[in-house]
Image (spheres, rainbow, N blue to C red):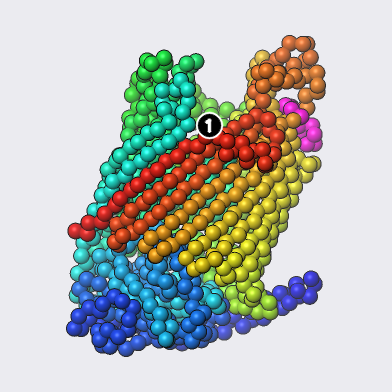
Amino acid sequence: MSKLCLAIILALCWTSLFSQMTSDEKNIKKVYITKHVNPHAPVIDAKPDDPTWETIPWETNFIQRAPYEGNPPSQQTAFKILYDDKNLYVFIRAYDTELKNIVRRMSRRDGLEGDWVTIQLDSYHDLQTAFVFAVNATGVKYDKTITEDGNNENTSWDPVWHVKTSVDEKGWNAEMKIPFSQLRFSNSQEPVWGMQVSRRLFRKGERIDWQFIPQDAPGYVSRFGELHGIKNIKHKRQMEITPYVVGKLQQSPIEEGNPFASGRGQKAALGLDGKFGISSDLTLDITINPDFGQVEADPSEVNLTTFETYFQEKRPFFIEGNNIMNYQVTGGGSDYSSDNLFYSRRIGRSPHYCPDTKENEYLNMPVNTTILGAFKLTGKTQNGLSIGILESFTNKEKAEIDFLGQRRSETVEPFSNFFLARLRKDYNKGSTIIGGMLTAVHRGIADADTGLNLLHKAAYTGGFDLFHSWKNKTHSITLNTVFSHVQGSKEAILNTQQSPVHYFQRPDADYVTLNPDRTSLSGFGGTFSLDKFGNGHFDYSFEVTWRSPGLELNDLGYLRGADRIMQWTWLGYRIWKPFAIFRSIAFNLNQWQSWNFGGDKLSFGGNINLNTHFKNYWGVAFGVNTQGEHFSTNELRGGPLLKLPGAWSYWGEIYTDTRKSFVFEVGTSNYLGKNDSEKQFDLWADVTFRPVSNLSVSLESAFSTKKSLLQYVNTMDLQDSQRYIFASLDQKTVSLTVRLEYSITPDLSIQFYGQPFISAGKYIDFKRISNPRADAFENRYNTFNAEQIQYNKDQNTYSIDENMDHHPDYSFDNPNFNFFQFRCNLVVRWEYIPGSTVFLVWSQGRTGIGTSGNFSFGNDFRDLFDVKPDNVFLIKFTYLFNL
């Protein structure tokens, strides 16, 4: 082991010494000069014998980017580019002397596997933005946009373009036709575009580029070569309308006596998506009555914290082009990295209010809020101004309540309007960027809608951001500021003050005031960071972020928690050139600490992480984390700060060669709280198997066990004080995620997703928090003895008699839980012509609960599939009209 460590240290020193050696030839920007087609446009068939291609020579001289940066590639690559008034034509020849070893893997669109080639176009020539068109050896398309000079990517962008591939005696070929209507560019008579052509030689893990860009370059798009020769092209305004029709059949369990649970329902709907080029650089997207029935379900979970779970957006309309609308409050490195002014899952969410029902009453609740329509205007002007504007309207939703045949309705979600505007301006070729963002939410809450009086009638957020870099973009500072202002009834603002995000009612928070007469609340926040990335093996980031107690972003954004000041430092060292047994190696060290606005130091800690990739293409990663004694603002759910013991934790994983048809990954993590306060062990194993080139099967399994001495149960009132009831928790969770993808052609695929999820938690040794800031951990709580606590089996409740006078002081429900759930989707997707698609979808959901708290995988798994399922069958038909 010592010899291995010595070898790594010597290699670090050696690499640092010789990394200063540069080649001026490698850093010169290449120029490719294209020509107008003559006499006619080429036929897109991936055959190089079209006479049109003979009018221009092959461009070669590619170079390795990885793994051996700057070396000649293992196989040669060449390309040609032509254009006419409407399209750009690209022919890429991927020479290969080992034809049988070309890796040809079939998948659906954007599943880029095996050997591939790509052309990346900075048609704005802003040195920040690129449109990427790629294809693998079987003809599977992959497209995306790159922004912020390579720091952001958006793979949801699906332009309409054409490509064919073929294999011949020299290797394989790709021929593309890219309509200018799918690009954004200036109206210059002789525009200059940035351009990169790249190739992936899969079997060697080799990345080959036309324009050499070092792996430690602090930018990407700004280092492209250039495409010259295009003359007098006019931007054809993109006008695409895609109407859809969907039919849905739902089968669900019949519930005796419930008039809303008849076991069957059907629905038909019409909708429309549109994309319009307002100018050569601005695009308007619209959607009317959208349907997202083909979208994969969210993963199952049991959340025992006060923090809202952040789910990824999966709906196409809100994913495409969302980079410009991103306003992340924190750059990263903490649990608060998801904080953002825009969290699109707020639009079309489940209703906020759920009416209470009495005996013999049955409730019919809408699952989600209906999106009536939305539009977004996105793009970047010729002078470097990026624009993102979104407007969306959601319908007023009502729940039906039936009582012995008599029905009434209650409003559970008001008519709402969501608005967002984002601007960013580049200066000095992107070295300086200044921007801002505003959001607004308005809800039509009527006086009669008493169930909605806890919602804000209006909510406004905004911010100003600044990025400035120097030394060829290797060093930078970033400043993000945010503010918020919400308005509503006294009940709504009081609810906000007392919510888990704020907890103004905390008795030890003397720097905030809980005011029941408020009808508005304001707050502020921000982040400052100093960073160095690129131009060497060593990088760093120093960041400070803050959230005032009154900051509230959760009407259209996401805020994990307010009242926080955090600081952290990240140091990293990376070697990307192979040496010894390593293909690459990366090491980083982190440090962090946090406070509240009252000056209490809430946490401090740090970790060390190592990630290695070996020459046999296997990989190993591991890390060690330490956390000092810290305070929680949330554990007592509005009570005072609770001091918690420090902890050590570690994690590690190993994965096999990802080029192979069988890939295996296994990992583990372990959290060890001091004073035996908490122990958590996680184990996961993932397997991906590709028996044939067009079939992929993956299994992702996970097991977790957690034992905690202090798990929140309830808050009870006793005379003029509150009792914070806790218990020891023993929780076990297991899940298995199955994914199957079978691609008949690049345009016709079958995908299956399924996840059984089982979790059980048993609470014992009930206790109350007596002195939350006591120096000794055991003095912070008192455990109830057998005379103080009684369990009522018939009512499944616990009664507490603190003073043992044989008169219970309070009682609470048994918190034990068993939760089991199964969710799956089966989607057949056929893009029968470019931009027009048919979806056949089957989805199923089963959910069961119990209160024993005992974990038994066999019994719980059997009980899960004894639950009667909800089934949804859907067919969706879209057709693209290109006007």
Q: Position of residue 221 (x, y in %)?
A: 41, 70
Verify whether residue 770 appears in magenta: yes
Judged left or right of residue 445, residue 867 is right
User: For numbered disc 1, what is the local secondary structure?
Assistant: loop
Q: In the rendered image of this protein, does residue 361 appear above or below residue 666? A: above
* Towards the viewer: 344 or 50: 50
826 relative to 191 in the view: left or right: right
Extent of the magenta region: 765-780
Does 14 sit above or below residue 235? below
> Looking at this view, is 328 or 178 the one in front?
178
Which residue is found at the position 70% from the left and 18% from the top?
792
User: Residue 177 location in percent, x, y?
Assistant: 29, 72
Badge 1: few (under 14), some or many (20 or more) residues near its Cα, within 10 Å? Answer: some
The quarter of the displayed image where residue 650 is located: bottom right
| Figure quadrant of the C terminus | bottom left
Residue 10: % across, % down: 72, 78
Is residue 137 rendered to the left or right of residue 537? left
